[in-house]
């Protein structure tokens, strides 16, 4: 089974998840700077979620590019990842509506954490499928970033009951860490092509 | 006529149907565990519908992969399937809003049943088009799973007036049966490639 | 300029327009047959709009398949068509919310009419671009169906002030006429391939 | 890294942004001409935003067509552009809900301005990546239109506090300027193919 239709479907789901969040954005009650200030926190969570889905899309792009084949298990691992990404608009909305209450902030972190776990499962499955000598396996030898992300997510989740700023710092931190493109994979792509 | 643009359009519709359901998810009234418990049934029906559309996407993927050509009739059989999948978000929402009343649970089952019938019609049409000696025809000789699904859907629909748990068990049962990828087709794909 | 990205974008817009209409569907007030009867007219207009966009997708598919190149003008003619298709969910919703009042029924007809005009402009542009000896030009010699559609739309629009049933009959009539795939083009596709 | 999946994802986001705006359109309160008159301003802003996203799609199409490769930086420059396009439905909605108050009209202009800046960054990055002798670099030598757009956006933004008609004229003016396809690029595409 080839990867192109998996990519097309995944692109579709990620493009929709990243775009429909705008439907959730409430407009300010008043057309003045006070109104803008009021929606600013919501807007920033929107930006954060947009960046997260963008990161997943970018990494997914690389992952699939280095994979030549997928099987039934990889399809389901991919659907699992898409599931957790597809509910990001929901957990983002809850966090906003609750004015950053601890539980919704924790749930948002769990959502990101489960997306990260789903991504790792997909990656592992694809590496096994391509073989230990494949370009993909060589590109992803240690996954330090992935492990640090899990630690930061855990800090963000637990920190929500101390201060949501700890959570915010942790979630933004993971995003910042990943915005820098994965040079291991990028190099492997460049070498392989 | 080739299958690639049919796949692209179908992927689009299925990706949207699977993703916009999140817009229907109501956030909890309170940011605590009580609120989470309150939205949990809704969330589980969301998961079920997500899995169903995921199954259809996966099987559709296989079906098209084994088909070399489509005609006008197959295009309409495909649109018929997409129609029933596109209203899954609506029947899911009604079921949730009614707190799992019998009629909406029955209607949800009818929706799934008609999607299954539409899929069978599309499959039959594509088999006839590819010919009796085609890879697709050989891959799908008996369709035991398809027949069992119809029986279980009927049980789920009728059971709604006895207990919605019968329906839930039936609908989850069909999904579980299909999550296991269709080995017949997968084998045929592997042999053919 | 090649047609594939135009097709991809058009598929996207049509897939979204056809699928988001389900977000507009109001669930019945009560979970019983009375509730079902209450939403039935809305559901039928949903089906009609779904079929219309399906017809456009199918014909667009054929049209692009027979075209080898597009230019800037064709891109804008295509965007014009997509615009009128993208507002079908809006005019459908207004028609439903007004319980089929004459003006919204008329506006729905105008929407369909302008989509048909936009399609004709796109078709004309593409024929000119491919040349008089092209497969596309030979496939579409007389456009009797297109002309009959315009007549029926006009009847449907004007009839709205006599009885919305005249409009309904006209709009359903055009859809029925087009559901039958365009044999001229289909034959040309088959001959050309 | 190749451009095709970037195009697919970008097409998806732009197709969704352009189509979901219709969900924001409020239907008239009354099914008569008074109701139509009431929603007309909203409808016109919808048309304007549709045209803007259409222009971006069309130019993006050309830009990618002339690019043979993308890198991580270009991916993020592209996501930045998609971000500003994805919030056009939000700023359009705010402008409408506030009945064209100065601040929302200004914010809409800033949105357009930042999308234009994002496009310029993407274009610059892609030109550098393809090299000074590439088809893309030769196609875009002076970018007079781009510079005039920035001036007009600034006029539109500042003018909002004098009269929203100045803003409207400026925003419509930029759109009109770009609807005419970019002949430099179109010629380069034609020459190159």
Image (cartoon, coloured by chain):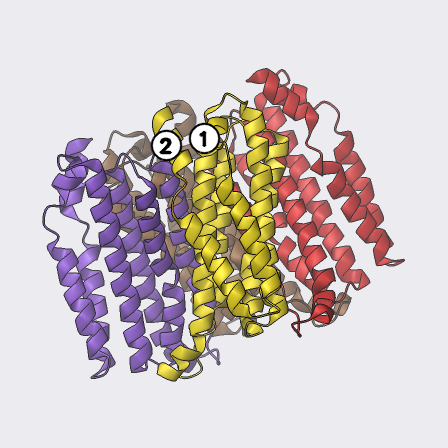
Chain colours: A yellow, B red, C brown, D purple
Upstream in sequence: badge 2 or badge 1: 1
Q: Give the quadrant of residue B59.
A: top right
B13 vs B166, left or right, is left
How many tags in the picture? 2
Point out which mark residue B112 bears: none
Q: Position of residue A102 (x, y in %)?
A: 61, 70
Point out which mark residue A139 bears: 1
Q: Give the quadrant of residue A58.
A: top left
Residue under the point 56% across and 47% down: A116
* Contact? badges 2 and 1 (CB < 8 Å): yes
Residue furthest to the right in view is B162
Along the viewing direction, whichever of A12 and A184 lies nearer the viewer? A184
Point out which mark residue A187 bears: 2
Along the viewing direction, whichever of D99 and C139 lies nearer the viewer? D99
Q: Mark 2 to mark 1: distance in Å?
A: 8 Å
Q: Position of residue B7 (x, y in %)?
A: 50, 37
Secondary structure of the residue carrying tag 1 is helix
Q: Chain of mark 2?
A: A
A106 vs D123, left or right, is right
- Mark 2 neighbour class, 10 Å CA radius: few under 14, some 14 to 19, many 20 or more: few
Location of the C terminus of chain A by quadrant is top left
The answer to whether residue A76 is seen in the rendering is yes
User: In this rendering, is residue D96 above or below D84?
Assistant: below
Secondary structure of the residue carrying tag 2 is helix
Residue under the point 39% across and 65% down: D89
Q: Position of residue C73 (x, y in %)?
A: 23, 47
D129 vs D187, left or right, is right
Residue under the point 65% across and 30% down: B124
- Mark 1 neighbour class, 10 Å CA radius: few under 14, some 14 to 19, many 20 or more: many
Q: Chain of mark 1?
A: A
The answer to whether residue B79 is seen in the rendering is no
């Amino acid at each position: 089974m080839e990867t192109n239709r998996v990519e097309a479907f995944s692109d579709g789901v990620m493009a929709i998840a990243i775009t429909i969040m705008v439907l959730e954005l409430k407009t300010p009650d008043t057309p003045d700077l006070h109104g803008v200030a009021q929606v600013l926190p919501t807007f920033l969570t929107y930006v954060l979620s947009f960046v997260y889905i963008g990161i997943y899309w970018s990494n997914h792009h690389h992952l699939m590019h280095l994979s030549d084949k997928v099987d039934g298990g990889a399809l389901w691992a991919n659907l699992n990842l898409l599931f957790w990404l597809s509910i990001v608009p929901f957990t983002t909305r809850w966090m906003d509506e609750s004015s950053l209450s601890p539980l919704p902030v924790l749930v948002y972190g769990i959502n990101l954490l489960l997306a990260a776990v789903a991504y790792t499962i997909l990656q592992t499955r694809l590496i096994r499928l391509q073989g230990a000598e494949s370009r993909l396996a060589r590109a992803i030898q240690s996954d330090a970033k992935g492990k640090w992300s899990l630690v930061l997510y855990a800090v963000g989740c637990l920190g929500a009951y101390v201060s949501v700023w700890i959570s915010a710092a942790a979630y933004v931190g993971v995003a910042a860490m990943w915005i820098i493109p994965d040079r291991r994979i990028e190099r492997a792509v460049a070498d392989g092509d």
